[in-house]
Image (cartoon, rainbow, N blue to C red):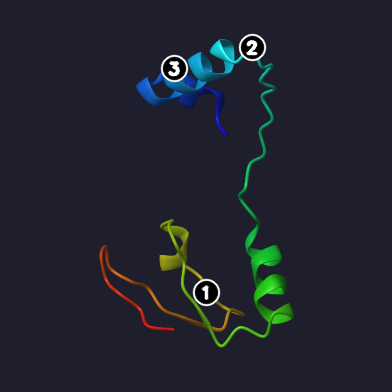
Amino acid sequence: MWRGYLDNDDGILVRKWFEEGRSRATHIHTSGHASPADLRLFAHAMNAKQLVPIRGVAWDGDTTGFPSIRRLTDGETMVV
C-alpha cells in the first residue's frame, strides 16, 4: 500500500498493533496499475465475455481491443 495510508487514523492503529505485538512491519509497495496493453492481453487470455472496470476514468476513453465493457454506476448490482 501507499506509505501515506499509515499516517491516517486507521494506519496509526495498524502501526500501534504491530508495535504492541513487538512485530516488525516491512513496507512493500507495488503500483497495481497495469498498462492498457497488458489488460487487453489478460482479458483475451481469460477469454472474457464482458469486462467490468472497478474504478478509473480511463475506461471512458479508447476501449479498442477489449471485450464488451460494462460500466456500473455506484451501488448498481450485477448478477453473474
As measured in the structure, the alpha-carbon distance from the residue carrying label 1 to the one carrying label 2 is 49 Å
Q: Mark 2 points at which residue?
A: 22
Q: Mark 1 points at which residue?
A: 63
At x 25% / y 65%, what residue is drawn? 75
At x 66% / y 24%, what residue is drawn? 27
As measured in the structure, the alpha-carbon distance from the residue carrying label 1 to the one carrying label 3 is 40 Å
Pick the quarter of the image with the C terminus: bottom left
Marked residue nearer the N-terminal end (3 or 2): 3
Using residue 70 as the reference point, say whether residue 77 is left or right of it.
left
Question: Mark on residue 17?
Answer: none
Which element carries disc 3, helix, strand or loop? helix
As rendered, which of 44 and 59 lies closer to the eye?
A: 44
> Which quarter of the picture shows residue 47?
bottom right
Asked if marks 1 and 2 touch (Cβ < 8 Å), the reply is: no
Marked residue nearer the N-terminal end (1 or 3): 3
Disc 2 residue crowd, few under 14, some 14–19, many 20+, Cα 10 Å: few
Q: Mark 3 points at which residue?
A: 12
Residue 44 percent location from the top left of the image: 69, 81
Disc 1 residue crowd, few under 14, some 14–19, many 20+, Cα 10 Å: few
